[in-house]
Image (tube, coloured by chain):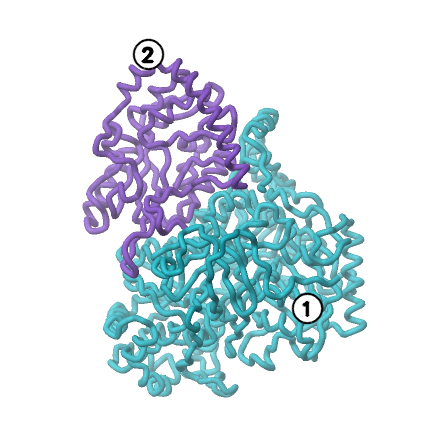
Chain colours: A cyan, B purple
């Protein structure tokens, strides 16, 4: 299945080439011309290039080691605050991402039916002309809003936004509603920022993690921070229906019943307020709405929460006291994944408020810098055209408090299918795999069937590209420039380490080329990638050459709301909002309130999903090095339940939800509640263009039912209930609905 | 010359496998081989009172290495700095080192008919380039793998046990095993529970190996090489049958649970 060159073959090849060896299955790649010209290498061709990782969105600093003009190794940059010299397994596998034998090397135009995977190679000229003409045709016929655009959070996003907003479409999908909308919207309503930064200093004594599996869902520096805090003796209380690797390192693991994290946190608020354990002076000075909150939480006793959560009232009360005793050196972490229900917005609000009540601001939580810097320049561009069409994802007409930049992706997909309030006709997708990521895969393919034109930008033929009409090959993160990333008082650079494979091009180049063909040149006023970055650097008085050598430039920090004036938090009141008038005005509860989650019926299980350290969402399973060191994707089932169902590890089961069915082998384990099963997302790929990942595991998206939290727009990923039945054969099940079968 | 050493702390290992990937890239380890494994206790206990412990495991770099004694052709050598190196040009593929090593470290590329071994050489070329640490220690996000002078690592191991006696069992694995090594492990649970080789009877077998080597290895080696070709063919056959190209990189002590 996996394309590999044997070591003997490799030794033969490398014997012919002089010098160091790199990743087993390829020749050590030649260093990029741009890097060679920048003078970071010595006469022998040895040296180090500083750049940034993109194996996930954390963006660790990377040092690419060059020997004899070849790239032999990536290491963490000790000077970068996100890596501190370390890289996770995904970061370590980066060269294999670029040298994936399945890379798309030229633009592709579909020749067979959608989903057949038949494409012909095309020139950039032809492919770009085709994309521009199809987009123009749709705009002329149905209006610009009939073109949908979506892309996952990345550094070239500002140019992607230029493309769609200049084109005139309001329809912008990101991945966030499938991940952490509840957390972002809750923090925005409470603190006026998406996510306060967390400070793990020597004094931090108590960490409450709600489904935040930080030792497997790795953000390198924060994973290190948590681990070091544990080494220093900080107490970690971890809520998760599953015994994860984080649970194994926590001081206390509480296998809470899914959907009831809110009850647990409301009871903590009840005790901390009722027993006056909060920081009174902080609350009086810096918050609004304490009385409304106090009134609401007075009914949420620990005894009430015990019945819902499966955690005893004594334990809940003890944790409330321990948390308050450790104040202000206590952190309640906004988890985001393990227990996502339609009540998750209130859970996240309760967690944010828990921090506020103990007054840990500027001690444990603080202002986060964000990714825009007022200190950086930018190419000039006109204002965007006014758009009057409604957004298909319901923002703001159905989801009034969801930020435009975040959106409700699953609703966008639903309304492509429904054609309500209007029919979409085209979808431009960049660095994203919605076929795998949006719940209910059959419905996503049904949405594709409604569209006249689909174009995908990616480095490999991902599942979405597989069903597209045109595929545009992007340069990998090791092959291209991206716009600068501000972080603290520095701006960091991603720069080419390796020459782009085949005809792959950067997003900056692709979007500009398309912009020009669409008559939107004014929004892309840069000659090339280097010119774009030079324009960014201009106000700093720093040259691109200096930044390329160091990997970063000093840049004065943009003043935060808190430093500029009395107003420390960017909320309507300027204070931390325990009660939110914004929420109340649009008909939601202004304070966190109990919202009973649905429960599985007799014989059904909660379907849980969550991350593993060796993969990122849906995009890294084809990386041969990560595949080498990944566990077989089996479905976890509780040992006692398995015994009743006569199941042993590696037995196959049929798993059925309201919308789909899969076959998968099980892992029988004590490490999960008896009412839950667990799957690792990102397996069960449809694209045969992913030769390493294709045929491995089953897809959680086939099973996931679409449920949207009405306030934050977040997908309730843990609210899907499934039945599990032993099967004898190992053949893959068809999904209940037929796969897309149109043109 | 100062001797190198590792301290590997199982209480810090999160089983992320960054070290395994880093090692593969740094040392150009073939896709079907690995030089590091994860020793995994599996999930033990009864819900909800569970435990799980893991640690990366690679060549111990023994002071008196059995593998070096067993190697008839000098492919395995011990350097002054304590590193046991391997020369694939010299190796005849007899696999005798595999039987000599009490830690089961030298592994063969079973899917290759003319097998070479693969084994940690402490990133000797990386250190030669002036880097401070081998790739595994450099990348570990939790400092579970630390690298330095052997004596410093040993002292650190004892200090950690002394300072936090409730966190560790009172045993530095590698201090005395096989006559002493350059890789030290400390752990919250007895090493048998992590799946380490039993240390009760483990003394330095190097002396015995030397006798065996001088008197009998060439014949054993030829015999072994013929036998191993048969194993290669069997493995090749099984892999084709099972369609698997995965390597076993996690060694779970308890089969019933936890090997996710």
Residue sitting at x 48%, y 72%: A182
Q: Answer yes or no: do the residues labelled 1 and 2 have beta carbons within 8 Å?
A: no
Q: State the residue lying farthest toward the top.
A: B215
Q: Is residue A539 left or right of residue B141?
A: right
Where does the image place residue A243, in percent across and percent down from the top left?
A: 35, 58
Residue that label 1 marks: A148
State the SS at label 2.
helix
- Select label 1 or label 2 by which is in front: 2
Q: Are marks 1 and 2 on the same chain?
A: no
Instruction: State whether residue A723 is above or below residue A403.
Output: above
**Viewed as shown, does residue B233 lie left or right of B144?**
right
Q: Crowding near pointer 2: few (<14 within 10 Å), some, many (20+)?
A: few
The residues tagged by marks 1 and 2 sit, at their Cα atoms, a distance apart of 77 Å
Residue B215, label in figure = 2
Q: Chain of mark 1?
A: A
Give the quarter of the image for residue A134: bottom right
Q: Chain of mark 2?
A: B
Q: Residues within 10 Å of mark 1 (few under 14, many from 20)?
A: many
Residue at 32 percent of width and 55 percent of height: A248
Residue A628, percent across and down? 50, 43
- Element marked by disc 1: strand
Quarter of the image where one finds residue A242: bottom left
- Where does the image place residue A545, in percent across and percent down from the top left? 60, 47
Residue A196 visible here: no
Judging depth in this view, the residue of A24 and A691 nearest the camera is A691
């Amino acid at each position: 299945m996996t394309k590999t060159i044997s070591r003997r073959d490799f030794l033969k090849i490398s014997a012919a080439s002089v010098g160091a060896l790199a990743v087993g299955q390829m020749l050590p790649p030649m260093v990029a011309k741009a890097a060679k010209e920048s003078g970071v290498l010595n006469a022998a061709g040895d040296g180090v290039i500083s750049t940034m990782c993109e194996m996930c969105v954390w963006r660790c600093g990377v040092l690419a080691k060059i020997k004899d003009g070849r790239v032999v190794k990536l290491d963490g940059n000790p000077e970068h605050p996100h890596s501190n010299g370390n890289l996770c397994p995904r970061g370590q596998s980066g060269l294999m991402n670029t040298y994936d034998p399945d890379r798309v090397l030229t633009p592709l135009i579909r020749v067979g039916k959608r989903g057949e995977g038949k494409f012909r190679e095309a020139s950039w000229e032809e492919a770009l002309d085709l994309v521009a003409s199809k987009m123009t045709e749709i705009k002329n016929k149905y209006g610009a809003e009939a073109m949908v655009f979506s892309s996952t959070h990345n550094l070239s996003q500002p140019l992607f936004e230029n493309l769609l907003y200049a084109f005139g479409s309001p329809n912008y999908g990101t991945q966030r509603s499938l991940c952490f909308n509840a957390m972002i919207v809750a923090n925005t309503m409470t603190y006026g920022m998406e996510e306060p930064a967390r400070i793990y200093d020597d004094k931090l004594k108590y960490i409450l993690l709600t489904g935040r599996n930080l030792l497997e869902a790795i953000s390198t520096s924060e994973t290190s921070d948590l681990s070091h805090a544990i080494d220093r003796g900080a107490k970690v209380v971890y809520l998760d229906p599953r015994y994860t690797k984080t649970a194994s390192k926590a001081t206390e693991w509480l296998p809470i019943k899914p959907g009831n994290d809110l009850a647990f946190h409301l009871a903590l608020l009840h005790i901390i307020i009722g027993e006056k354990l909060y920081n009174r002076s902080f609350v009086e000075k810096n918050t609004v709405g304490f009385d409304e909150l106090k009134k609401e939480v007075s009914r949420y006793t620990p005894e009430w929460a015990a019945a819902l959560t499966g955690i005893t009232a004594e334990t809940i009360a003890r944790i409330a006291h321990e948390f308050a005793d450790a104040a202000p050196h206590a952190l309640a972490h906004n988890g985001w994944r393990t227990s996502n229900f339609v009540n998750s917005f209130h859970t996240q609000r309760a967690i944010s408020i828990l921090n506020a009540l103990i007054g840990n601001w500027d001690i444990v939580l603080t202002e986060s810098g964000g990714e825009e810097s007022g200190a950086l320049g930018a190419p000039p561009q006109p204002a965007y055209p006014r758009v009057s069409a409604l957004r298909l994802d319901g923002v703001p007409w159905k989801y009034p408090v969801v930020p435009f930049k975040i959106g409700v992706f699953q609703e966008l997909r639903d309304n492509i299918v429904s054609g309500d309030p209007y029919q979409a006709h085209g979808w431009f997708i960049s660095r994203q795999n919605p076929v795998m990521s949006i719940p209910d895969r059959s419905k996503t393919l049904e949405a594709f069937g409604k569209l006249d034109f689909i174009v995908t930008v990616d480095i490999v033929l991902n599942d979405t590209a597989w069903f597209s009409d045109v595929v545009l090959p992007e340069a990998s993160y090791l092959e291209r420039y991206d716009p600068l990333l501000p972080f603290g008082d520095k701006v960091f650079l991603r720069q080419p380490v390796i020459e782009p494979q085949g005809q792959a091009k950067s997003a900056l180049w692709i979007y500009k080329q398309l912009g020009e063909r669409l008559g939107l040149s004014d929004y892309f006023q840069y000659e090339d990638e280097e010119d774009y970055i030079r324009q960014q650097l201009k106000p700093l008085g720093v040259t691109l050459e200096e930044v390329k050598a160091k990997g970063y430039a000093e840049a004065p920090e943009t003043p935060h709301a808190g430093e500029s004036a009395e107003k420390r938090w960017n909320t309507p009141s300027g204070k931390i909002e325990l009660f939110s008038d914004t929420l109340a005005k649009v008909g939601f509860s202004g304070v966190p309130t109990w919202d009973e989650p649905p429960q599985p019926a007799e014989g059904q299980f909660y379907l849980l999903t969550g991350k593993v350290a060796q993969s990122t969402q849906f995009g890294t399973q084809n990386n041969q090095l990560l595949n080498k060191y990944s566990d077989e994707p089996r479905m976890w089932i509780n040992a006692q339940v398995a015994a009743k169902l006569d199941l042993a590890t590696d037995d196959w089961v049929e798993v059925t939800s309201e919308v789909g069915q899969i076959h998968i082998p099980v892992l029988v384990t004590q490490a999960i509640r008896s009412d839950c099963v667990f799957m690792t997302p990102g397996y069960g790929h449809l694209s045969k263009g992913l030769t390493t990942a294709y045929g491995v595991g089953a897809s959680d998206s086939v099973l996931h039912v679409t449920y949207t939290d009405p306030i934050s727009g977040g997908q309730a990923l843990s609210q899907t209930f499934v039945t599990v039945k032993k099967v004898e054969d190992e053949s893959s099940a068809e999904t209940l609905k037929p796969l897309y079968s149109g043109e | 010359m100062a001797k190198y050493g590792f301290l590997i702390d199982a209480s810090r290992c999160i089983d992320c496998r960054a070290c395994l990937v880093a090692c593969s890239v740094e040392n150009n380890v073939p896709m079907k081989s690995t030089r590091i494994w994860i020793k995994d206790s599996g999930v033990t206990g009864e819900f909800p009172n569970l435990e799980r412990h893991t640690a990366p495991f690679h060549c111990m770099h023994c002071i008196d290495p059995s593998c070096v004694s067993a190697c008839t052709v000098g492919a395995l050598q011990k350097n002054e700095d304590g590193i046991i190196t391997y020369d694939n040009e010299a190796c005849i593929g007899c696999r005798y080192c595999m039987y000599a090593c009490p830690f089961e470290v030298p592994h063969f590329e079973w899917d290759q008919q003319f097998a070479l071994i693969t084994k940690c050489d402490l990133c000797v070329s990386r250190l030669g380039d002036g880097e401070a640490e081998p790739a595994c220690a450099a990348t570990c996000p939790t400092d579970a793998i630390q690298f330095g002078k052997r004596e410093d690592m040993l002292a650190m191991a004892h200090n950690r046990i002394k300072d936090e006696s409730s966190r560790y069992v009172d045993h530095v694995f590698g201090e005395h095993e096989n006559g002493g090594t350059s890789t030290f492990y400390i752990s919250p649970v007895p090493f048998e529970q992590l799946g380490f080789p039993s240390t009760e009877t483990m003394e330095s077998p190097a002396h015995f190996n030397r006798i065996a080597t001088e008197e009998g290895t060439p014949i054993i080696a030829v015999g072994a090489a013929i036998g191993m070709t048969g194993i290669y063919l069997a493995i090749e056959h099984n892999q084709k049958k099972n369609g698997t190209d995965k390597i076993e990189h996690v060694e779970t002590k308890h089969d019933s649970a936890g090997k996710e």
